[in-house]
């Protein structure tokens, strides 16, 4: 992504076949996807958030939980 900022919007709803999520992004150009299920959503979000990292940042994923 080349813009100074990026926005990622999620719109989710239930369907008889499962969870459907529409993902919208803007970083100077608008992009959108429709994914089915949480596994596909996670894979897409990993890709999109990786695009936000500056090149060579060496950032690693950290997991947190709210207890």
Image (cartoon, grey):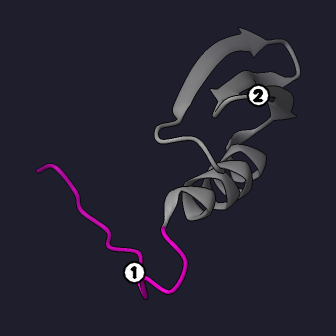
Vertical side of 51 occupied by 41: above or below = above
- Position of 66 with respect to 11 (left or right) is left
Give the residue at mark 2: 29
Can you tell which mark lies on residue 3?
none
**Mark 1 surroundings: few (<14), some (14-19) or many (≥20) residues within 10 A:** few
Identify which residue is drawn at 59% across, 22% down: 10
Residue segment shown in magenta:
54-67
Going from N to C along the chain, the mark reached first, 2 or 1, is 2
- Give the image location of residue 26, x and y in percent: 65, 27
- What secondary structure is found at the residue carrying circle 1? loop
Foreground: disc 2 or disc 1? 2
- Give the image location of residue 21, x and y in percent: 72, 24
Vertical side of 11 occupied by 54: above or below = below
54 and 50: which is toward the camera: 54
53 and 20: which is toward the camera: 53
**How far apart in space, not on screen, are marks 2 and 1 (Cα)?**
25 Å
- The majority secondary structure of the magenta stretch comes to loop
Can you tell which mark lies on residue 59?
1
Total labels: the figure holds 2
- Position of 54 with respect to 48 (left or right) is left
Vertical side of 47 occupied by 55: above or below = below
Residues marked 2 and 1 touching at CB (< 8 Å): no
Residue 32 occupies which quadrant of the picture? Answer: top right
Q: Residue furthest left?
A: 67
Identify which residue is drawn at 64% across, 49% down: 2
Identify which residue is drawn at 81% across, 28% down: 31
- Position of 62 with respect to 38 (left or right) is left
- Give the image location of residue 42, x and y in percent: 64, 52
49 and 27: which is toward the camera: 27
- Give the image location of residue 6, x and y in percent: 53, 36
């Amino acid at each position: 992504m080349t813009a100074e900022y990026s926005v990622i919007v999620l719109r989710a709803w239930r369907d008889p076949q499962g969870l459907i999520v529409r993902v919208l992004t803007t970083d100077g150009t608008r992009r959108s996807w429709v994914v089915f299920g949480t596994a596909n959503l996670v894979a897409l979000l990993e890709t999109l958030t990786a695009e936000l990292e500056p090149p060579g940042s060496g950032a690693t994923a950290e997991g947190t939980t709210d207890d």
